[in-house]
């Protein structure tokens, strides 16, 4: 099952990777993460896409278990579905070594990073980045290092801890809205010169 006992959704198959590796998924995830439970029309209005486009992706995401219908609201023609995230904790599980699916997995990661970058740039240009936040709380960090299995497990534990903090804040009605992006990826080292100082 994709949903783990700790509430994390693991994306395992190439079809699932391609589904979450889209700007539309990032938009839907962000809208539901901030808004809780929303209709396709409400999501579309928040992210600047058509209701038809959003609904198409919502049904696909519902089919794999990433989102769910939590309510049917009365409407003029027929009840309108209200969607919510099953979990905010989504992890892409890489394919086995030398798998033919490796390319699709890498492409999905690339699309997610580009979509998140576009979201950040749009927020900066539109003035949506909060200017009254404590500057020391803004964190942008990148490091490249040769990690032992123990160190990788430690990083994984820290990521899980951060995920727990985000889960605790899921239904909060006060506080500032922050975006958190975490990535830890293995690289094929071609030489010692590629390990840059942090």
Image (cartoon, rainbow, N blue to C red):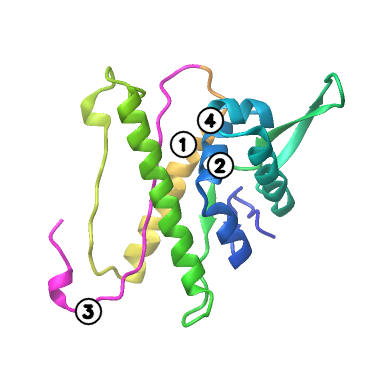
Q: Which residue is mark 4?
A: 48
Could you tell which of marks 2 and 1 lies nearer the N-terminus? Answer: 2
Could you tell which of marks 4 and 3 lies nearer the N-terminus? Answer: 4
Q: Closer to the observer: label 2 or label 1?
A: 2
- Say which quarter of the image contains residue 170: top right
Q: Which residue is mark 3?
A: 190
Residue placed most toward the observer, 55 or 34 = 55
Does dot 2 land on a helix, a strand or a loop? loop
Alpha carbon distance from label 2 to label 1 = 11 Å
> How many callouts does the rendering have?
4
Could you tell which of marks 4 and 1 lies nearer the N-terminus? Answer: 4
Above or below — where is 149 with respect to 68?
Answer: below
* Mark identifier at residue 88: 2
- Label 3 crowd bin: few (<14), some (14–19), many (20+), radius 10 Å: few
Outermost residue to the right: 77
Q: Identify the residue at image location x=62%, y=34%.
A: 50
Alpha carbon distance from label 4 to label 3 = 43 Å
Residue 116 percent coordinates (x, y): 41, 44
Residue 181 on the magenta span: yes
Alpha carbon distance from label 3 to label 1 = 37 Å
Instruction: Evaluate whether residue 34 shows in this view.
Output: no
């Amino acid at each position: 099952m994709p949903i783990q006992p700790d509430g994390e959704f693991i994306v395992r198959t190439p079809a699932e990777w391609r589904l979450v590796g889209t700007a539309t998924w990032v938009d839907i995830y962000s809208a539901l993460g901030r808004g809780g439970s929303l209709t396709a029309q409400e999501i579309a209005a928040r992210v600047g896409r058509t209701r038809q486009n959003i609904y198409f992706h919502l049904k696909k995401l519902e089919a794999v278990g990433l989102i769910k219908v939590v309510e049917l609201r009365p409407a003029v023609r027929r009840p309108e579905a209200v969607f919510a995230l099953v979990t905010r904790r989504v992890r892409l599980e890489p394919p086995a070594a030398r798998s033919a699916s490796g390319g699709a997995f890498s492409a999905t990661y690339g699309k997610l990073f580009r979509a998140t970058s576009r979201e950040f740039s749009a927020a900066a240009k539109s003035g949506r980045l909060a200017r009254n936040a404590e500057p020391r709380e803004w964190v942008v960090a990148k490091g490249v290092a040769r990690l032992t299995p123990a160190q990788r497990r430690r990083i994984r534990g820290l990521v899980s801890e951060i995920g727990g903090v985000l889960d605790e804040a899921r239904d909060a009605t006060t506080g500032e809205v922050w975006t958190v992006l975490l990535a830890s990826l293995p690289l094929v080292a071609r030489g010692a010169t590629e390990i840059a100082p942090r």
